[in-house]
Image: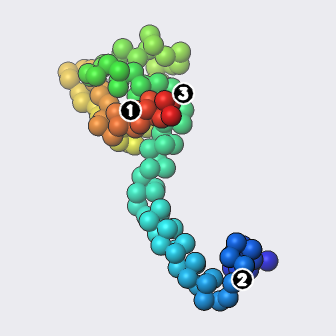
Amino acid sequence: MSSTERLQRYLADERGGCGDEEVCQRLSELEEIDAAAGGPALDEDVGLLSALANETRYKIVRILHIAGEELCVCEFAPLLDVSDSAISHALSQLTDAGLITRRKEGKWRKYRATARANAVLIALDGSREL
């Protein structure tokens, strides 16, 4: 059974009858919804969520958010139970995803959560209260 035939059966069940015009109208409505849900923002959002979908990376962003200031790469090691190379890799991925910024000061690298990372964490925190 094609997806259009399934939609026609669904509309017939819900509305007590369904012709080709109703199916075409509903398909048009669904295509508008799909266009609004997709696009370049979809890829960017999936990239952001993928970057947070790891305990080490999520904890780094959370630490930076709570700190509210820059932290040196060396300050993460005592807080995370992973190797220095894993921390470095996680920081690179988070930087690439736009969740943290990096700047070099002398021989040290300092990191800070971006406004977008802070907004995502605030939204997550707020959703726990729902």
- Residue furthest to the right in view is 1
- Please state if 61 lies on the left or on the right of 26 as rendered: left
Q: Nearer the viewer, mark 3 or mark 2?
A: 2
Mark 1 and mark 3: Cα distance apart in space: 18 Å
Q: Which percent across, then down, holds residue 10?
A: 72, 73
Q: Tell me, yes or no, whether the two marked residues, 3 and 2, touch with CB atoms within 8 Å.
A: no
Quarter of image, res 66: top left
Q: Residue at x 40, y 17 (%)?
A: 76
Q: Which percent across, then down, holds residue 109?
A: 28, 24
Residue 54 seen in render: yes
Q: Residue at x 51, y 68 (%)?
A: 34
Mark 3 and mark 2: Cα distance apart in space: 50 Å
Q: Nearer the viewer, mark 1 or mark 2?
A: 2
Q: How many marks?
A: 3
- Under circle 1, the secondary element is helix
> Which callout, 3 or 2, points at the residue further toward the start of the chain?
2
Q: Which residue is mark 2?
A: 17
- Residue furthest to the front in view is 16
- Under circle 3, the secondary element is helix
Q: Which residue is mark 1?
A: 122
- Residue furthest to the left in view is 106
Q: Which percent across, then down, holds residue 92?
A: 40, 35
Instruction: Work out whether 42 lies above or below 128.
Output: below
Q: Residue at x 49, y 50 (%)?
A: 46
Q: Nearer the viewer, residue 129 or 56?
A: 129
Crowd rating for badge 1 (residues with CA inside 10 Å; few <14, some 14–19, many 20+):
few
- Under circle 2, the secondary element is loop
Quarter of image, res 121: top left
Q: Residue at x 61, y 84 (%)?
A: 22
- Please state if 10 lies on the left or on the right of 22 as rendered: right
Q: Which residue is mark 3?
A: 55
